[in-house]
Image (cartoon, rainbow, N blue to C red):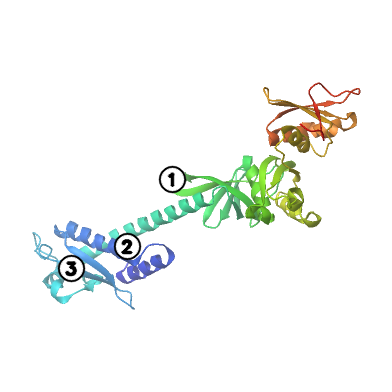
Amino acid sequence: MPEASLGDSLRLIEAESELSQEALLEVVAAAVRQAWLEERGSEPLVRATLEQPAGNILIDFLDMAESTQEPAGEPAQGDCLSLSHQPSATGPQPLADLPPGVLRRALRLARARLSRLVRETRERKLTGEAEEHRGQLVDSIVERVQDQTWFLRAGDLQAVLALVEQIPGERLRRGQHLKVVLMESRRAGGGEYLQVRASRTSPLLLRRLLEAEVPELTEGTLAVRAVAREPGERAKVAVESLRPEIDAKGACIGLRGVRIRNVVAQLGGEKVDVLEWASDPAEYVARALAPAPVLAVKIDEESHRATVTVAPDVLSLAIGKEGQNARLAARLTGWRIDIHAHEGSAMPAGARELGQPA
């Protein structure tokens, strides 16, 4: 790296990083001190400056008491001129005027140290960015696939969408924009670079997509209380209105269903049921089993079990295909749910008919 290009590199690094010109010039000064010590056996007090507008690096020897002493042995011809100078009297001199041996070593040291400093600064920035966006929704671009793992670009971050984090059956293509949530980060490539785990299956993705579509959620007038998903197939979301005049379910669905349709589109067609959260466990369990109407719910606090009674003709609807509706309702509410068809005229002992006071 010639001296002129080192000055240009400093200005380029300063423009593209958060490093100050003073910090970069101190790296050069430290390299000169180290090079002089290794070549001449003494360590001068050195300051580096950048000449404007040419961009040449100037070296100012602040204390040459020891560094101007002749080393043992015969000095190289190119060294004599530089060592005959009195830098304290002449002021800063171009970096290129250093003795050739010192110059070569200083440039090599400066180049290595600047590269390391830039790399460390970039890694700190990326680590901070990854932590800042952890758990957040980002728009990524699909770059490549390897062994069923997709590599994404999310701003300056490299994100990895492993098979377990992919929506089953979803086909991706290079260059495609893809909404993901960013999870934890890790060092990859033997610690050479940072990777962030991305997810399309996390319930957090659905929560963040709703927040992006429903302003009331970010404004604090609505709240998402729980999310349960079977990615690519179906999901349930419980929302609560924090203001009596706002319809929580209607706000999330949107006028003519536009808001929830946008969310569903981002999930590749995954069906999303929105229901109103309830503080009463029996009411909450009944709502979670929608679209099946529930006749009664018996709550057993000790076993944390909810026994649900439905009409015989809606039993299969309440349970859902392969038990999916009941399974999602259980995940959403946190209650173990047993569903039974109503037989005879009386409800099970201890069951509360819905619509009746607790």
Please, what is the three-letter code of the amino acid marked with disc 2? Ala
Contact, CB < 8 Å: mark 1 with mark 2? no
Dot 1: within a 10 Å radius of its alpha carbon, few (fewer than 14), some, or many (20 or more) residues? few
The quadrant in which residue 71 appears is bottom left
Q: Quadrant of residue 356?
A: top right
Helix, strand or loop under label 2: helix
In the image, residue 199 lies at what x, y percent?
Answer: 61, 45
Kindly identify which numbered label has been placed on residue 23: 2
Q: Nearer the viewer, mark 1 or mark 2?
A: 2
The mark nearer the N terminus, 3 or 1, is 3
x then y, percent, for residue 47: 23, 66
Report the residue that reaches farthest toward the bottom: 53
Mark number, residue 191: 1
Callout 3: SS: strand
| Picture layout, residue 200 above or below residue 325 | below
**Quadrant of the image containing the C terminus:** top right
For mark 3, what is the residue? 61
Give the distance between the C-alpha atoms of the residues marked 2 and 3, in whole angstroms.
Answer: 18 Å
Q: Quadrant of residue 102?
A: bottom left
In front here: 126 or 119? Answer: 126
In the rendered view, would you say 89 is above or below 271? below
Q: Are marks 2 and 3 in contact (CB under 8 Å)?
A: no
Foreground label between 3 and 1: 3
Badge 3 crowding class, 10 Å Cα cut-off, few under 14, some 14 to 19, many 20 or more, is many
Report, in whole angstroms, how far the alpha carbon at label 1 lies from the one at label 2: 26 Å
**Kind of residue at disc 3:** Phe
> Residue 296 at what x, y percent from top left?
82, 30
User: Is 8 displayed left or right of 140 in the figure?
Assistant: left
